[in-house]
Amino acid sequence: MPLTSPIAAAAAYRASAGQPSPAPGGQGGAGSFAEALQQAAQDTVETMHQADAAAEAGILGNASATEVVMAVARAELALQTTVAIRDRVVQAYQDVMRMPI
């Protein structure tokens, strides 16, 4: 499945939100949707690593319970957001595949 349609949609969304759309390699923003997804995934992974580190610090007595709970809550929210995005992408793909030709 080519990414040109979702990328164009992401560029249009960015334009409507008043955000500049990056244009790597002169593709007119063709990499922006994929880059946004990649950045979101990297941010989620980083949040998970921070939660692991906070939990470890809490076990060792180097962090308060509040810090551990906040880090775990952030990680849980990031994971829920990632799963929701994945579900929406899968649903959009299924909708496109059901379209009559």
Image: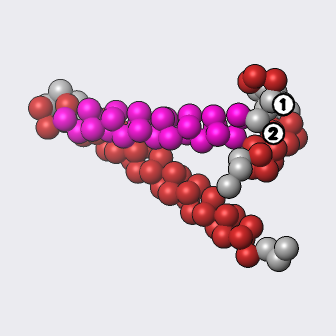
Q: Residue at x 18, y 27 (%)?
A: 62
Label 2, secondary structure: give it.
helix
Q: Which amino acid does label 2 sit on?
A: Ala
Q: Name the residue under label 1.
A: 28
Of residue 99 and residue 43, the one placed in the foreground of this image is 99
Q: Main secondary structure of the magenta part?
A: helix
Residue 53 position by quadrant? top left
- At numbered mark 1, what does the secondary structure look like: helix, strand or loop? loop
> Quick check: can you spot residue 84?
yes
- The image position of residue 77, as x and y in percent, is 47, 50
Residue type for callout 1 = Gly
Residue situated furthest left in the rendering: 60
Q: Position of residue 10 (x, y in %)?
A: 77, 43
- Residue 88 in the magenta stretch? The answer is no
Quadrant hosting residue 91: bottom right
Q: Position of residue 13 (x, y in %)?
A: 81, 44
Side of 83 where 50 appears, left or right: left
Residue 98 lies, in percent from the top left, at: 73, 76
Residues at discs 1 and 2 in contact (Cβ within 8 Å): yes
Asked whether, in this view, residue 39 is left or right of residue 50, the answer is right
Say whether residue 66 is visible.
Answer: no
Q: Which of marks 1 and 2 is in front?
A: 1
Q: Quadrant of the C terminus?
A: bottom right
Picture residue at 45% right of the left edge, 51% below the top: 79
Picture quadrant of residue 86: bottom right
Q: What stretch is highlighted in magenta?
A: 31-56
